[in-house]
Image (cartoon, grey):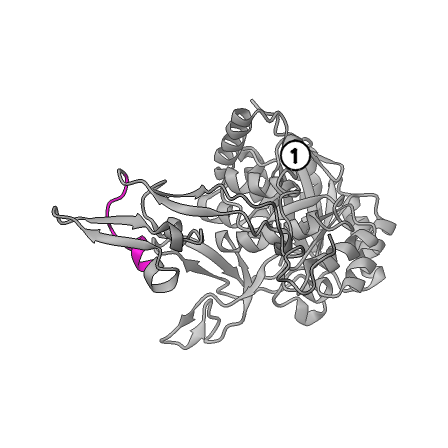
Amino acid sequence: MADLTTVFAGIKSPNPFWLASAPPTDKAYNVERAYEAGWGGVVWKTLGEDPAAVNVSSRYSAHYDGNGNVSGFNNIELITDRSLEVNLREIEAVKKSWPEQALIVSLMVPCEEHAWKTIVREVEKTGADGLELNFGCPHGMPERGMGAAVGQVPEYVEQVARWCKMYSTLPVIVKLTPNITDIRFAARAANAGGADAVSLINTINSITSIDLDQMAARPIVDGKSTHGGYCGPAVKPIALNMVAEIARDPETASLPISGIGGISNWRDAAEFISLGCGNVQVCTAAMIHGFRIVKEMKDGLSHWMDSKGYNTIADFQGAAVPNTTDWKYLNINYKVVAEIDQEKCIGCGRCFISCEDTSHQAIAITAQNNGTNKLEIIEEECVGCNLCEITCPVDDCITMVKRDVEKPYLNWTQDPRNPHREAS
């Protein structure tokens, strides 16, 4: 079997699956159950100064797909509402009992040097393996000058990272907010501040739905609501893009990345790792399915690695980064067209409707004597957009097939039609 052991920012863990800082990591009871289930590491729910935060009721809402499954999860919960002393005592006890598992502590205090100096030194006494600086919480805490209020200002990110490196010997991971125009600026700031790694993405500002009877957004607190933090499978595409932006930025390409955002199975994890992540953090999937989901993740990733000949995580880490580029460098002369497997086609016509109404009218439909439809691609009209393949309900019925084009590689920077093309 493949070796799933990882060393991330100097922190060793038996596998790349960590629980993200969230309700599932709020106390020793949960964390020990997670370790028993097989999680390689845990990021303890964010600690702050005493008095502890005060949470509201209710706190969660969700966005569902057409089958009733949770595709997006929203929460308005704040950082831990348990005292700092209790949390620190439990962290120390858990680490002593589980020395092989990674234990990282998430932190959020006011943007003042003394506050950070005090708390990082207290955490270091517990024997924890590292610190994660929560610069991403999008609700409640930013109103107090913390969370995303810090993460959205690169100068603050750099400053706090530098304080933590100054007053602690533990690895420092900076958790980045996605509620920002360009994720690279915050990552560069974390790097400049001496951070050992970054983790992303934190949750996205969201309102999942409106209760049309109460005329209030969910979750509802005494008739009122607010925006919360959005996570779950729906945010995965956004997270992958932001991870890729950091991984291929020359200023941060060597900065270790912990991938977060909609990771629900081994394939999601493999995708994040292929874009440069050294490990992944999971929250929503564990909240919906329980801690034992990690067994499927570990087994699936290990079997896939075996099938590909990858012995370690490092063997494919970052493999997709060189193939991720700016649009202007894509080959304009490359051509694919759709192809329908007539033996698999059920004649439903979904591809025809989508292409005819909203695309390039590249599919012909013919009624057959037996009452079925025959769908055929009009190749000269097909632009290879993939829409028919996406809408087809039958696996591998419609595929995109490369056509040989006797034209050399040409991108937009070289195209004569581009008035600003680069000199050859």
> At x 49% / y 57%, what residue is drawn?
73
Is 357 or 421 nearer to us in this picture?
Answer: 421
Figure quadrant of residue 127? top right
Report the side of 214 relative to 375 (left or right).
Answer: right
Q: Position of residue 281 (x, y in %)?
A: 60, 45
Vertical position of residue 15 compared to residue 19: above or below: above
Percent coordinates x, y for residue 97 in the rendering: 66, 33
Q: Quadrant of residue 47?
A: bottom right
Which residue range is magenta in the image? 344-354
Q: Amino acid at mark 1?
A: Gln
Front residue (pair 305, 79): 305
**Does 134 sit above or below residue 140?**
above
- The local secondary structure at tag 1 comes to loop
* Farthest residue, direction front: 406
Q: Is residue 401 magenta?
A: no
Residue 311 location (% of width, % of height): 62, 25
Q: Nearer the viewer, residue 20 or 323?
A: 323
Magenta-colored stretch includes residue 347: yes
Relative height, residue 169 to residue 313 (above, below) = below
Q: Is residue 200 visible?
A: no
- Residue 151: where, in percent of width, then height? 71, 62
Rendered residue at 27%/41% (across/down): 342
| Residue denoted by label 1 | 101
Where, by quadrant of the figure, is residue 344 drawn? top left
Q: Quadrant of the N terminus?
A: top right
Disc 1 packing (10 Å; few <14; some 14–19; many ≥20): many
Inspect this view and state whether residue 93 appears: yes
130 and 317: which is toward the camera:
317
